Image (cartoon, rainbow, N blue to C red):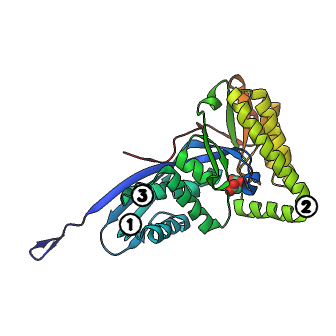
Amino acid sequence: MVIGNWVLVIIMRSITLSAPGKVMLLGEHAVVYGQPCLVTAVNQRLQLTIEQSDGEDKVETPEVGDTRFLDATIALFKEKFHLKTGLLKITTNCIFSGKYGFGSSSAVTSAMVAALSQLYNLNLSERQLFDLAYLVVLNVQGLGSGFDVAAGIFGGTLYYVKGGRVLEKLDNNILNDGAEIIVGYTGIKSHTVDLVRQVAEKKAREPEKFDRIMLAIGQLVNNAKIKLAEKDWERLGTLMDFNQEYLRNLGVSSEKLESLISAAKRGGALGAKLSGAGGGDCMIALARSDKREEVKQAISNAGGEALNMKLGAEGVKVEE
Ligand code: MEV
């Protein structure tokens, strides 16, 4: 820009990162009550670009629909690191449709904390990024276990306890060795916050029964972690079925989820369950590799959308 005889150089820095979506394998809902879960990052990624230039602190998000997670991340960084951000122009591009429930909010939060750390040379570790991302989730939603931002930051397949009290990366290749997880979309939107509240009401109504279910799910997840490492697919499938029974008991399954789950089982799956908060979104089925196509077909025939995806994807990363 030329003003009179002066040339004004506006320094602009730009960075693009991507973060993966996630699929809950076992332990949803119980993880909110301190039990462990198994979650995996999926190769459906969200890309976030920030262009930063000097000047007054201002944020422009021309194409981002829901800016709550971005705004909360910036507010948290300003508070913690006393940042003067300058002008930030943020754009996001989600490769996966928000409809599947793979976690576009958690992916955007994971990408944003990592982007701000890079942009302002804060050199934060993965653990620090996770702690900040979890705070953002709590600030925006007021509830949640943080399993989704753990998958967004760390990637891979994780054994996880709320707030990152335990955060263990499992062998990434196991889920593609002889058997695999197939994801089926119901076509129905799930409302996580409502379902988490609904489950909390169940706890208030029947506290003892509720605690027994939570404990049983926790034990089943611990068992599943061992069976996964042993590649004992039969038993892992049975544990998925048990988990689904408990989720049904909690009242978070639905007719469509049940119909895709039974179809997958009839099609030869070793186990099947809903994945995530329930009510809709996705179900998952475990099938031996030679049964994959039959199980996918069974899910499609029952009115679901069998999705192709790779599990155990990389966590948040800078894109060239
Ligand atoms: C939602 O995908 C999974 C829940 O366990 C909530 C959470 O862990 O934050 C229901």
Nearer to us of marks 2 and 1 is: 2
**Tags 3 and 2 in contact by the CB under 8 Å rule?**
no
Q: Where is residue 8 in the image (x, y as percent from the top left)?
A: 18, 70
Q: Which residue is drawn at 47% across and 49% down?
A: 18
Looking at marks 3 and 2 on the same chain, the residue that comes earlier in the sequence is marked by 3
Q: Position of residue 27 (x, y in %)?
A: 74, 47
Q: Position of residue 188 (x, y in %)?
A: 72, 53
The C terminus: image quadrant: top left
Q: Residue at x 85, y 47 (%)?
A: 246
Local packing at callout 2 (Cα closer than 10 Å; few below 14, some 14-19, many 20+) is few
Q: How far apart are marks 3 and 2 (CA)?
A: 44 Å
Q: Which residue is drawn at 66% across and 47% down?
A: 160
Comparing 20 with 223, the one in front is 223
What residue does disc 3 label? 117
In the rendered image, the vertical position of residue 298 relative to residue 280, given as above or below = above
Local packing at callout 3 (Cα closer than 10 Å; few below 14, some 14-19, many 20+) is some
Q: Is residue 275 visible?
A: yes
> What is the residue that sits farthest to the front in this orientation?
165
Helix, strand or loop at label 1? It is strand
